[in-house]
Image: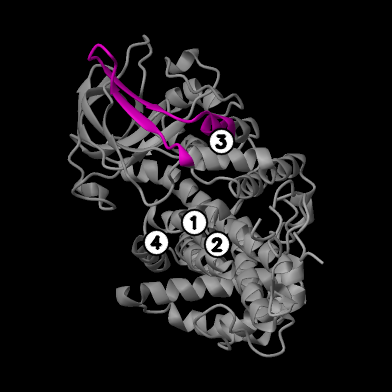
Amino acid sequence: MTHQVFNQPPPLVDHDVAADPALPPDLLDDDVVRQLGRRAGSAEVQRWAEEANAYPPRLRTHDRYGNRADEVDFHPSWHRLMEVAVGAGLAGAERDERRRAAGLYVWSQAEAGHTCPISMTYAIIPALRHQPDLAVLYEPLLTSRIYDPELRAPATKRGLLAGMGMTEKQGGSDVRANTTTATRNGDHWLLTGHKWFTSAPMCDLFLVLAQAPRGLSCFLVPRVLPDGSRNVFRIQRLKDKLGNRSNASSEPEFDDTVAWLVGEEGRGVRTIIEMVAMTRLDCVIGSAAGMRAALVQAIHHARHREAFGRRLVDQPLMTAVLADMALETEAATALMLRLAGSAEPLRRLAIAVGKFWVCKRQTAVVGEALECLGGNGYVEESGLPRLYRDAPLNSIWEGSGNVQALDVLRTLRREPDSAAAFLDEVALAGGADRRLDEALTGLKALITGTDEAQARRVTERMALVLQGSLLVRHAPPVVADAFCASRLGGDHGRTFGTLPPGVDTAAIVDRAAPPAGRGAPSSKPS
């Protein structure tokens, strides 16, 4: 032997992911949330996550005889992750939205990719209700807690999964530029065209947009028709993505593909936007979860790793970095929980604000967490490279940053009740912190007469002010004060670890630290 292994952190396994101080007591006491937390931190589920990403989905376009197959094969660990998520009600709309958000937040810290079809299945319900006959037929199966992955006629299955297909090559977010056409054929429609980015192509049902005679409309496309025959859903290829490797994203083509109209013809965007609003909320949940997962790894490493005679966590500069990341993460979690269960006129505006800001901050937090581990964080075994590759995703899907900021600007201009509701929400913490009060006054002036070029600036400020209000109301003073001083008072640099003097960084890190998992750190031999 040339050396002994010491001064390495123990694996962070068999710990309770739900033991998160940012979750309020009613959610910490929720049986489903706690069960998901214990499973998410287990060695078994961590292995599932690794395998689902190490062995990505594989497309089979044809069978051995040359017939179209258009099926995607997943590693068994993907199916195990899906089974737990569906069984916990994360894809079912009957669970209280706030509790469901907490469960998704906890569970997706184990593995994010499989939550894509979970999110879309949950989100399809409000849009599908625009067509009551279809909702009556499919909603009980979409809200089922039974995972049934085989492609069969939907009505013969014990549970269904749903996806969506909006974007095309030539338009991207500009879905009104879509060229896929819809032609009426008796009691159904026939679609011809393509979609450019359709994830989870093995779902049973899809909401898609196509041009009907009266304009862009929303349609329900089943993979398998009621008689058991395959609908035309030709998967040309799977995307070779930066991250999100466990999840398949595809390019399907339609050729007289059978579909049913959902909602009013020519009002497709208004119909499908109800699904999009729900998936945008799940993007915020997923980004908050990714930030928390990375932060936990960084703190765990720093508590067990020594350098220059002291634990990393006891070194003031490292403590400042970790505390700064913890503030960012807790603020994201607080905002996510407020968005879940929110109602109009606040909901649409606040979700766009949260989607813009929280999803962008994920990349910064995960990158800093990786750096806390140094070279150990840069290798695949640490899990942080997967978190880093996944980090930009939620900021892109369901409308990128510019789309969200412009949506915020339009809502401020066209829906004064939404703007008033947002300001009223922030004002609930009025008088509790001078910096928050001053920031709210400045925000009121900023949102008046803002032009398009300032949309990001306004949206960012709205997010920070709302986060500050939530932390002042719900977080301990040490957290709220540090956030308001750094994010609202302007006493902060452009990188993590630049909090103002006097912040009790050790208390913030102790609050955010994960509970001890199984194992002990390797110590220096005597």
Q: Is residue 344 magenta?
A: no
One can see residue 263 in this view: no
Mark nearer the N terminus (2 vs 3): 3
Query: Considering only order in the chain, which callout, 4 or 2, is on the residue closer to the N terminus?
Result: 2
Sequence-wise, the earlier of marks 4 and 3 is 3
Looking at numbered disc 2 in the image, what kind of residue is underneath it? Answer: Gly
Q: According to the image, label 3 marks what residue?
A: 91
Name the image quarter holding the N terminus.
Answer: bottom right
Identify the disc placed on residue 368.
Answer: none
The numbered mark, 3 or 1, whose residue comes first in the sequence reads 3
Q: Are marks 1 and 2 in contact (CB under 8 Å)?
A: yes
Q: What residue sits right under mark 1 in the picture?
A: 385
> Which stretch did the figure color magenta?
54-82
Q: Is residue 210 left or right of residue 144?
A: left
Q: Amino acid at mark 3?
A: Ala
Q: Which residue is mark 4?
A: 404
Tag 3 secondary structure: loop
Q: Which residue is mark 2?
A: 377
